[in-house]
Image: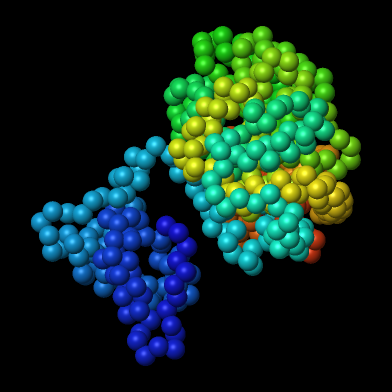
Amino acid sequence: MAEIEWKPQKSSTVSLHQQITSFMKKKITHGEWTIGMKLPSQRNLAKQFQVNRSTIITALEELAADGLIEAKVGSGTKVINNTWSLLASTPPPDWISYVKSGIHQPNISIIQEINQAEANPSIIRLGTGELSPELLPKERMEQTFQSSGKLNLSLGYTEPKGSLALRQTVSAYLKTKGIITSSESILIVSGGLQALQLLSIGLLKRGSTIFHEAPSYLNSIHVFQSAGMNLIGLPLDEEGLAYDAIGRIKSKTQQKSALLYAIPNFHNPTGTLMSEKRRADLIAVCQKESIPIIEDDVYGDLWLDSPPPRPLKAIDTQGNVLYIGSISKSLSPGLRIGWIVGPEPVIEHLADIKMQTDYGSSTLSQSVVESWLHHGLYEDFLKEVKAELRYRRDFTMGLLKKYFSDIATWLSPKGGFYIWLKLKPSISTRKLFDLALREGILINPGIIYDKTDDQHLRISYSYATLDELERGLIILAQVIKIQAKGQFY
């Protein structure tokens, strides 16, 4: 259940429990809270409504007396009725059963908790993988919108592959990375995640295999799992994805339909940068095994020390690599613009699927991104934001050295947003997540990216302010030490 925004009015002449009873009854009778829906615990309801638990108990007792809810030991309190089923012989649809039978799987519970906590402005977000609002070019973006002469603006639908002007500009921009491609081989998408969604339903049949790094960003989303794919993790070392097992696993499992997903540049969540040699070896192995590669390069522009090796796509001579790029991490997540580069038949097929889902990405956003790339504004901003990220990384590394040296190990990332923190104490990172959140600190445990990983935390230096980073890491270190001693709150 989503966070409840409504709160009872404590200045009202109507008692608090009556206000809450009335609110919840309307939710049930209007069909917003459906039959079978589980209500939050009494403690959580009291917290959300900002009242005593006794007030919640009274309200729930009245709803139960009216036959609207039922509490069972071990399974919680659920909605069992509404006015329609009380008045009619034919019960209303059981929407919960529809939700459970939907094709797309829900996020794991901890991801849902993170998404809800991120809406709380008082939370210090130590794991959020996006640029801080203070780093985004708000004023310059407003000037771009106001200066319509700089925009190749269209308010109608674009062609299936996206704005031609933007695709031509992206083609020129990719040449600076060593990727030679025409506008016909580029599809504009609404960010990197939509790219993955299109690929998951457009290229492989159910039961196909997706090889990926372990840990992996893919485990924190369900686009491939929901499409019926099998995910097989491959280990990472200091040079990137260890490809040795690909052929053996493919042969052993007799996988005829397989694909590799990789983030060579500043990997999410570990921050690893794949070496130039490893890239060449990976391309050779995948060509030998006839395994196409999805290269996710959304962090590629965010190098902090020196430029990374050329993308896999730049050394691909057989059209074996589908390349995903985006400005969501480097310029603005709100614009929701990215691109897929690949063979024309693949791009045309994915464009057709995209037209069936959203009929094209925002033309306004496409115009803005085209303007920023074409006029050099993006490159100018990148220099500034990389300088800020470099300072933040070094600042965070100093804090870790001061407060975490005895409880964790880590490596300094060469770009991107993330530090992969390995905890020395043998503790539950799921429990740590709960304890830290209670202290107003939001973290991303390793179990999000690999369900067997209970040793790591993904620490991001890109979102929280410098003051929040310092306060948050000091508190987090204290919580870890307390948990390691078994002194739970």
Q: Out of 82 and 279, give the one closest to the viewer.
A: 279
Q: Is residue 90 left or right of residue 370?
A: left
In this picture, is 62 found above or below 395? below
Q: Is residue 174 left or right of residue 482?
A: right
- Residue 383 in percent (x, y) is at 86, 48
For residue 399, what is the image quadrant? bottom right
- Residue 225 in percent (x, y) is at 49, 32
Q: Quadrant of the N terminus?
A: bottom left
In this picture, is 428 found above or below 440? above
In this picture, is 391 found above or below 260? below
In this picture, is 460 found above or below 261? below
Q: Out of 471 and 329, give the one closest to the viewer.
A: 329
Query: In the displayed image of the protein, which residue is found farthest to the front?
Result: 149
Q: Quadrant of the C terminus?
A: bottom right
Is any part of residue 397 visible from this angle? Answer: no
Residue at the image position 67 percent from the left and 12 percent from the top: 287
Q: How is the image coloured?
A: rainbow
Is any part of residue 204 visible from this angle? Answer: yes
Residue at the image position 57 percent from the left and 24 percent from the top: 346
Q: Is residue 454 left or right of residue 403?
A: left
- Residue 278 in percent (x, y) is at 78, 21
For residue 304, what is the image quadrant? top right
Q: Out of 175 and 389, give the one closest to the viewer.
A: 175
Q: Out of 365 and 246, give the one closest to the viewer.
A: 365
- Residue 57 in percent (x, y) is at 34, 72
Residue at the image position 40 percent from the left and 66 percent from the top: 42
Q: How many marks?
A: 0
Query: In the displayed image of the protein, which residue is found farthest to the right?
Result: 306
Residue at the image position 45 percent from the left and 28 percent from the top: 228
